[in-house]
């Protein structure tokens, strides 16, 4: 595939760079010993790198870190973008080309723990994975990714734990006032209008009362509009053709979209506001208390102008080369069988609030206690409003694939698609699922509310001897998450609802849909719909399964001992400990006699509740041996868990008898499911994913200026949660609970799909990384430097093929890769910083993987999709005045997605299902610091 060669080329470049860095650092030791260098103050990019290296070196666990040298100095606009630069860490990028969620060591985002200042965070999506793009870089002082467990690290993940840290005002020596203004231009290189955006930030940090009181306030506001094009289709078509020069051809292929077209232009409007406030009070070494508040509001609107519709042969006036039609003409039927002008608006409004109060005090010599209270919440209101338009008459579609890229379409009645008097919003017959119920549009979307309340009490006791510190404590966390779904067809208020609508006032022409040259009349549907339209609610197994509530009460007791001793002549430090985790989980959901067929009243009496209690004992150990001269060998062993996704825990169930015979022979029904029960459900009794993890890492440090490392890791997954279909399930209990009559087959045995605790497998891999300033070789290279990492991960976990399926759909034969697993990840950054100038260029790459993608199917449930591997390039160049009246003033130009990566979703055979072009982004930033 396209990404494969790119991955090999990048690996070649990175391998060469890695070799150079190793040789560079080896020579740097001798060079530094031969020179007596003056002490210099390191700032900017290099200071951030050195701080991150210091965190990595001094932690007992195996970690990766990013650090802002100064307020607002992280090199990216969100923490998600910054984390994606770390070894063994990669991001799932959205269709918009932005980093969103994070995968660690080949496991998907749901396997991570998400913390803010050490506290569990809520999420706006359907699962536990937090959207890290909501955290503005200007409000974050740094982040640590823990790759190994620690008994004092609570709500940790099986893959790793991400702890974002807000600014500590008492860590600054003086008052700081900083502000910045950014202008953004996006979508460069596309055949659509360029997007624009603005970003403003202001930060204030100060200390009072002889540095006993610290205050930090931060505000970020960003808005922008971006434009993209998407190419897709309903799969490769095989048609018969009448050739342009005479004659015929059979079995002619039209790749990707020959069975149906699906091309669109996409406009995305995004507004974000972030606020952080920190109050710190430290009157003495014996007492420190800090209150921190974080607030984020994200309003996102996406408008899709889309052409869609099925195609079938034969084609005429065709040009055929190599068995494929390069040119030709399809016949399109009259409404509703013609081309569909689809107008879709997606509203996504997120609100996050987090407040924490942490106090630490000495209550006796060598004894300290910490009390931490926190409350955080996340809310998402998502609505997806669709409208279907088209002309009423039959038409022709002529295509030309000879130019490469998107095919060019010419419609026989081209002018009618932009003329309000000839194109109408009309019933797309048969889409509603109910005979006689028209569907000229669709409304769907959930409201999600997630809350976490927590209390944690720690006690620390300093000791003499091999064990230097004893830490123990208790944490109580309560999490509730509710998802409420509302769905229905949109029809006319007149008559039976099937009358065509005129396009509303304010409609406009969208040109060159998906790059095909096709123009169409469109409008932006709103939640209030349009004149003469109404929503008719509907229900089936899929819709009912998407309303649920989850409650988790987690009590964790832990003890950890820090160790400093010697093994022979090797100094060894680290920690060992254990967590005792008790979980009381329960969930609600609709349980009803219903299948995939649509009804207009909710058959469920109300929400039903069920749950389970369980306890896990999780030991952990981290050891590091100082081999001298900056050489460190680390070893970690522990047991880790990741709780089931909240969707899988839902207490919903839909069961019905299959009363439609899908196949007959000689007048006899041969459909194997006819007359049997078919059902699907969530599982509130699920236990967590569980694994033993072993890590070994060798690290070589050159002070805090540079390091190189090589690590191997192995995880033995004892249990893995997946969807499974039981072909011989006994529905006796469910039939009694739902008052179901004995089916036609006479047996209560049927087909049941649900999430289960299945068998595990192994996950293993290796990582190499290096970071160094080139001044280690020669003072002539002072200011230049590079960092590099490469990871390779494999897994023996065999999962059923859930690609494109909602959780209630039957599982077919076959397997799919482990979600989130990219076998290869590589990244490289080259930078320069001196005399106030700073610059870097970076490239990241990840190979193919299965990601969770929302809004791909009716109802918007996230579904697993195979996503093509890709690389993305970013760069920055800037200057900060070092003295004079302009001191503190800085200007920076940044480019993201400079290689114009294309987001592609693939079919199981590797062919392209759809692709989205986002183009490159350019950002101009002006900042000033007092």
Image: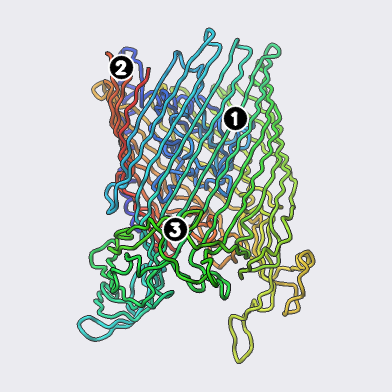
Q: CA distance from mark 2 to mark 1?
A: 36 Å
- What's the residue at 63%, 14% (across, down)? 287
Residue 782: x, y in percent?
27, 23
Q: Report the mark closest to the observer, 1 or 3.
A: 3
Dividing the picture into quarters, in which one does residue 114 lie? top right
Q: Is residue 393 above or below residue 348?
A: below
Residue under numbered circle 3: 344
The disc, 2 or 1, on the residue closer to the chain's N-terminal end is 1
Residue 223: x, y in percent?
40, 39
Residue 711: x, y in percent?
47, 38
Q: CA distance from mark 2 to mark 3?
A: 49 Å
- What's the residue at 33%, 39% (across, down)? 184
Q: Quadrant of the N terminus?
A: bottom left
Residue 470 seen by the camera: yes
Dividing the picture into quarters, in which one does residue 155 lie? top right
In this view, the residue farthest toward the bottom is 666
The mark found on residue 588 in the picture is none
């Amino acid at each position: 595939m396209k990404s494969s060669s790119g991955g090999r080329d990048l690996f070649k470049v990175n391998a060469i760079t890695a070799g150079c860095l190793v040789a560079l650092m080896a020579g740097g030791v001798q060079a530094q010993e031969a020179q007596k260098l003056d002490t210099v103050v390191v700032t900017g990019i290099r200071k951030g790198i050195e701080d991150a290296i210091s965190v990595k070196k001094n932690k007992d666990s195996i970690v990766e870190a990013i650090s802002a040298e100064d307020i607002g100095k992280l090199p990216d606009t969100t923490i998600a973008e910054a984390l994606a630069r770390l070894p063994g860490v990669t991001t799932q990028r959205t269709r918009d080309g932005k980093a969103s969620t994070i995968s660690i060591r080949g496991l998907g985002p749901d396997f991570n723990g998400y913390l803010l200042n050490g506290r569990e965070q809520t999420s706006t999506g359907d699962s536990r994975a937090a959207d890290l793009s909501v955290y503005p870089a200007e409000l974050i002082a740094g982040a640590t990714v823990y790759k190994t467990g620690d008994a004092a690290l609570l709500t940790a993940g099986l893959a790793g734990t991400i702890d974002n840290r807000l600014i500590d005002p008492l860590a600054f020596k003086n008052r700081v006032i900083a502000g910045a203004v950014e202008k953004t231009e996006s979508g460069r290189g596309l055949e659509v209008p360029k997007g624009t955006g603005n970003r403003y930030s202001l930060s204030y940090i100060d200390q009072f009362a002889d540095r006993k009181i610290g205050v930090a306030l931060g505000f970020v506001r960003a808005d922008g509009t971006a434009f993209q094009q998407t190419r897709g289709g309903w799969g490769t078509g095989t048609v018969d053709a009448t050739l342009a020069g005479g004659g015929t051809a059979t079995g002619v292929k039209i790749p990707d979209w020959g069975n149906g077209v699906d091309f669109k232009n996409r406009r995305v409007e995004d507004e974000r506001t972030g606020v952080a406030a920190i109050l710190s009070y430290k009157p003495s070494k014996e007492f420190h208390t800090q209150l921190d508040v974080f607030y984020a509001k994200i309003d996102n609107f996406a408008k899709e102008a889309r052409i869609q519709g099925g195609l079938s042969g034969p084609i005429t006036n065709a040009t055929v080369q190599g068995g494929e039609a390069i040119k030709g003409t399809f016949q399109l039927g009259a409404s509703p069988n013609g081309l569909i002008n689809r107008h879709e608006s997606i509203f996504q409004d997120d609100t996050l609030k987090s407040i924490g109060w942490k106090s630490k005090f000495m209550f006796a010599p060598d004894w300290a206690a910490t009390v931490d209270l926190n409350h955080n919440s996340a809310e998402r209101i998502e609505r997806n409003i669709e409208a279907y338009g088209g002309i009423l008459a039959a038409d022709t579609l002529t295509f030309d694939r000879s130019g490469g890229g998107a095919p060019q379409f010419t419609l026989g009645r081209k002018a009618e698609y932009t003329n309000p008097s000839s194109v109408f919003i009309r019933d797309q017959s048969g889409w509603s699922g109910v005979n006689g119920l028209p569907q000229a549009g669709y409304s769907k979307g959930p409201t999600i509310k997630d809350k976490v309340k927590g209390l944690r009490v720690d006690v620390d006791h300093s000791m003499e001897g091999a064990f230097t510190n004893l830490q123990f404590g208790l944490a109580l966390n309560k999490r509730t998450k509710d998802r409420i779904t509302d769905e229905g067809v949109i029809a006319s208020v007149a008559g039976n609802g099937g009358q065509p609508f005129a396009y509303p006032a304010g409609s406009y022409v969208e040109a060159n849909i998906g790059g095909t040259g096709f123009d169409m009349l469109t409008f932006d549907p709103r939640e209030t719909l349009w004149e003469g339209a109404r929503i008719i609610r509907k229900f089936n197994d899929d819709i009912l399964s998407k309303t649920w509530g989850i409650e988790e009460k987690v009590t964790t007791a832990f003890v950890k001992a820090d160790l400093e001793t010697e093994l022979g002549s090797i100094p060894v430090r680290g920690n060992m400990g254990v967590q005792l985790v008790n979980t009381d989980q329960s969930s609600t959901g609709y349980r009803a006699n219903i299948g995939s067929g649509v009804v207009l009243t909710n058959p469920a009496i109300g929400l039903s509740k069920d749950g389970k209690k369980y306890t896990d004992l999780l030991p952990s150990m981290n050891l590091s041996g100082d081999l001298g001269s900056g050489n460190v060998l680390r070893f970690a062993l522990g047991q880790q868990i990741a709780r089931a996704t909240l969707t899988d825990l839902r207490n919903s169930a839909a069961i019905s008898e299959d009363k439609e015979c899908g196949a007959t022979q000689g007048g006899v029904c041969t459909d194997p499911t006819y007359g049997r029960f078919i059902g699907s459900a969530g599982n509130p009794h699920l236990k967590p994913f569980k694994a033993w993890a072993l890590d070994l890492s060798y690290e070589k440090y050159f002070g805090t200026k540079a390091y190189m490392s090589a690590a191997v890791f192995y995880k033995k997954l004892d249990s893995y949660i997946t969807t499974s279909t039981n072909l011989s399930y006994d529905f006796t209990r469910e039939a009694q609970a739902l008052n179901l009559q004995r089916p036609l087959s006479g047996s209560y045995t049927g087909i049941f799909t649900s999430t289960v605790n299945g068998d595990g497998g192994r996950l293993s891999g290796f990582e190499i990384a290096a970071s160094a300033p080139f001044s280690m070789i020669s003072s002539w290279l002072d200011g230049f430097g590079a960092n590099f990492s490469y990871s390779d991960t494999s897994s023996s976990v065999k999962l059923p093929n859930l690609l494109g399926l909602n959780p209630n759909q039957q599982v077919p034969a076959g397997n799919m890769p482990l979600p989130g697993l990219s076998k290869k990840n590589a990244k490289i950054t080259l930078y320069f910083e001196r005399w106030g100038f700073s610059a870097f260029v970076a490239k990241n790459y990840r190979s193919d993987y299965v990601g969770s993608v929302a809004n791909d199917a009716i109802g918007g449930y996230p579904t697993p999709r195979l996503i093509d591997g890709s690389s993305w390039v970013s760069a920055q160049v800037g200057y900060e005045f070092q003295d004079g009246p302009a001191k503190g003033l800085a200007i920076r130009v940044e480019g993201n997605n400079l290689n114009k990566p294309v987001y592609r979703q693939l079919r199981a055979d590797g062919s392209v299902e759809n692709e989205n072009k986002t183009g490159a982004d350019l950002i101009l930033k002006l900042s000033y610091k007092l």
